[in-house]
Amino acid sequence: MRTSRFAVALTAPLATAALLVVSTTAVAAPPDKVSVAATPTDQLRTGDWGTRIVNGERTTVKEYPFVIAGMRVGGGGPQGQSCTASVVGKRKILTAAHCMVDTSGAKSYFYGDDDLNTPGDETFRTAVASFKTHPGYTGSGGWRTGYDVAVVTTVDDIPVPESQWAKVAGSGDSALTQPGKSGTSLGYGKTSSGGGSGELRKTTMPVNDPSGCQVFDIRVNADLMVCTGYNDGRTADCSGDSGGPFIVDGVVVGVSSWGSSACDRYSIMARLTNAMGDWARAEIGGTQPGDGKFTMALSPASGKAAPGSHVSTSVTTKAGDQGPEKLDLSASALPAGTTATFQPSASIDSGDVAKLTLQPSTSTPAGTYKIAITAKGTSGAKTAEFTLTVGDGGNATGPKPSLSSNSGIVPPGGYANATITVTGGTGPIRLSGTGLPHPPTFSPPTVNPGGTSRMTVMGRTSAVPTR
């Protein structure tokens, strides 16, 4: 008697106005199983904490003078510590939206303490006067789908000089979160399953290609999230680190949002190198401390054009500390047949404004595309993202699913994964699967036209004898 290995056949109908069915098989899963995702707050259960957490090193508020501890009544850390945050203004703090929405208890902030386990060391504490979460945050549990960022207004002035406020990234800083970059994560969170929290620590983690980070039961959305760290948990954010900054080249490019419930895989940050960062900067108000280099932004940052027509945006620039410099403008990731024209020229001085016209050809496929606009000068380069919708965005033919692979083999009780891409249709599209021993799961279960979802299928749990 021996146990057979078997291929799992899949049917993936999508519930829309009309039912579409795709017959295929899933690609083999990696040897590790799908991890349960959780926010790295003190809401994690003790039994969920693994033995390989953070593995960073002690640091101080003197080294990072903008770091501040988020407290709440009932918080699980020392003195009620619950989250970590960054001072970004006289009475402004940047943190994760779920730190404000998903937890109960009156909230306050402690400043100046490197170790919350010794009460009374803080130099300042203040209550929360008000807060705003990003309009896209959907409420409790919204971290699963993104927009996990909030700006808090405090009752009192925070004793941090303006020159030491955290620098917050925006849509003109997308180059800072490209895979291959490396950054520093800060937090007061847990350090081991049996150990404590409350010590300010730092760790260095790489920025990863999001396609390699789909190891959770929810999807890592690259438009709204940054995947950092390692898949083996050698260092990671954990309980109490939520809302803390992820810093690349001296700029906060993300805030700690979620990761594995065991804190042993990748750490996911809410992305700020996009419109989310622009929103946060607008809510913070005033002038954000910069990196001394020129700045670049798009207005508007999105537009729609029919095939054969065109849409325009303004590329606005501002000189840095070294004064005006020559900037060379370019556009990349253009959809097939689309041209990009800069007026009056693709070479301007920082401080000037250029008009960018994007013109799809009559044969450019309908869809929504992310186009990278780059300005390069002697002091460096800045990149902003323009969202171009061609035609109806792909709605004409109705929703059409496709899978990343059409074959795979899994052992009994094992898992198989495939990426589903949905084109066409209008509005949210719900995914479901039938005809399997165990219903597949989709992360996320609902996508918009052009979106992707990770499908996970489990093989039969009992051995099948061969005769």
Image (spheres, helix red, strand yellow):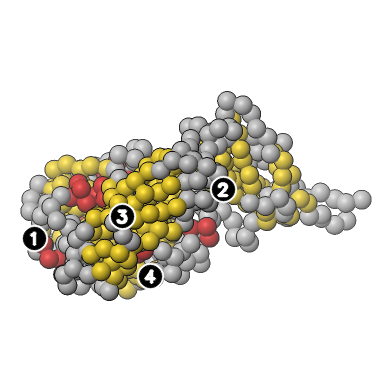
Label 3 belongs to which residue? 343
| Three-letter code for the amino acid on which mark 4 is drawn | Ser
Q: In this view, does 309 lie to the left or right of 148?
A: right
Label 2 belongs to which residue? 454
| Three-letter code for the amino acid on which mark 1 is drawn | Pro
Label 4 belongs to which residue? 182
Image location of residue 432, percent across then percent down: 61, 36
Label 1 belongs to which residue? 159
Q: Look at the numbered disc 2 and give the secondary structure of its residue.
A: strand
**Between marks 3 and 4, how big is the CA–CA gap?**
35 Å
Q: Look at the numbered disc 1 and give the secondary structure of its residue.
A: loop
**Between marks 2 and 4, how big is the CA–CA gap?**
26 Å
Q: Which of 114 and 434 is in front in this view?
A: 434
Neighbourhood count class around disc 3 (C-alpha, 10 Å): few under 14, some 14–19, many 20 upward: some
Image location of residue 93, percent across then percent down: 19, 53
Q: Which of marks 3 and 2 is in front?
A: 3
| Outermost residue toward the right in this view | 467
Neighbourhood count class around disc 4 (C-alpha, 10 Å): few under 14, some 14–19, many 20 upward: some
How many discs mark residues in the rendered view?
4
Residue plotted at (52% across, 50% down): 337
| Three-letter code for the amino acid on which mark 3 is drawn | Gln
Neighbourhood count class around disc 1 (C-alpha, 10 Å): few under 14, some 14–19, many 20 upward: some
**Between marks 3 and 2, how big is the CA–CA gap?**
42 Å
| Three-letter code for the amino acid on which mark 2 is drawn | Arg
Circles 2 and 4 in contact, beta carbons < 8 Å: no
Q: Nearer the viewer, mark 1 or mark 3?
A: 3
Quadrant for the N terminus in the image: bottom right
Q: Look at the numbered disc 3 and give the secondary structure of its residue.
A: strand
**Between marks 4 and 1, how big is the CA–CA gap?**
30 Å
Question: Tag 1 or tag 2, which sits nearer the N-term?
Answer: 1
* Position of 229 relative to 83 (above/below): below
